[in-house]
């Protein structure tokens, strides 16, 4: 009984960590490497445990991080302006 409870706690904590990595914009491949899991396993957990709101919040964060990296390298980003 104690073993199954301990396993459930570890899995719950692992899923929480995975969710935070994903929402922060860490790619699934990198999450799999960090957690020592298969990339397919990470994708299944994300589909099952990460809600759509968290997933949609992750997209702008990832985009913003890419823009910050581009700015640090000295390259200029071009934005389209209406009008």
Image (cartoon, helix red, strand yellow):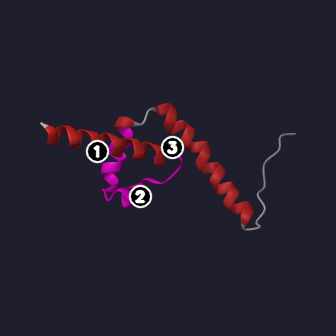
Is residue 41 toward the left or the right of residue 50 in the image?
left
What residue is shown with label 3?
A: 23
CA neighbours of label 2 inside 10 A, class few (<14), some (14 to 19), many (20+): some
Sequence-wise first label, 1 or 2: 1
Q: Secondary structure at mark 3?
A: helix
Percent x, y for residue 71? 74, 61
Q: How many marks?
A: 3
The residue positioned 15% from the left and 39% from the top of the image is: 2
Q: Quadrant of residue 58?
A: top right
Percent x, y for residue 27? 47, 54
Task: Give the Cα separation between the discs numbered 1 and 3.
Answer: 20 Å
Choose between 20 and 58: the one closer to the eye: 20
Q: Quadrant of residue 56?
A: top right
Percent x, y for residue 77? 76, 58
Q: Are marks 1 and 2 in contact (CB under 8 Å)?
A: no
What residue is shown with label 2?
A: 29
Task: Give the Cα separation between the discs numbered 3 and 2.
Answer: 14 Å
The residue positioned 30% from the left and 56% from the top of the image is: 37
Is the C terminus in the top left, top right, bottom left or bottom right quadrant? top right
**Which one is in front in this view, the residue at disc 1 or the one at disc 3?**
1
Sequence-wise first label, 3 or 2: 3
- Region in magenta: 22-47
Would you say residue 46 sits in the magenta stretch? yes
Q: Which mark is residue 10?
A: 1
Sequence-wise first label, 1 or 3: 1
Is residue 67 toward the left or the right of residue 37 in the image?
right
Would you say residue 51 sits in the magenta stretch? no
Task: Give the Cα separation between the discs numbered 1 and 2.
Answer: 21 Å
Is the N terminus in the top left, top right, bottom left or bottom right quadrant? top left
């Amino acid at each position: 009984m104690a073993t199954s409870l301990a396993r459930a706690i570890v899995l719950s904590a692992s899923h929480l960590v995975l969710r935070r990595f994903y929402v922060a914009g860490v790619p699934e491949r990198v999450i799999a490497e960090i957690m020592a899991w298969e990339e397919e396993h990470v994708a299944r957990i994300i589909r099952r445990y990460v809600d759509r709101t968290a997933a949609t919040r992750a997209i702008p964060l990832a985009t913003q991080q890419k823009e910050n990296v581009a700015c640090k390298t000295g390259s200029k980003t071009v934005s389209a302006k209406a009008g």
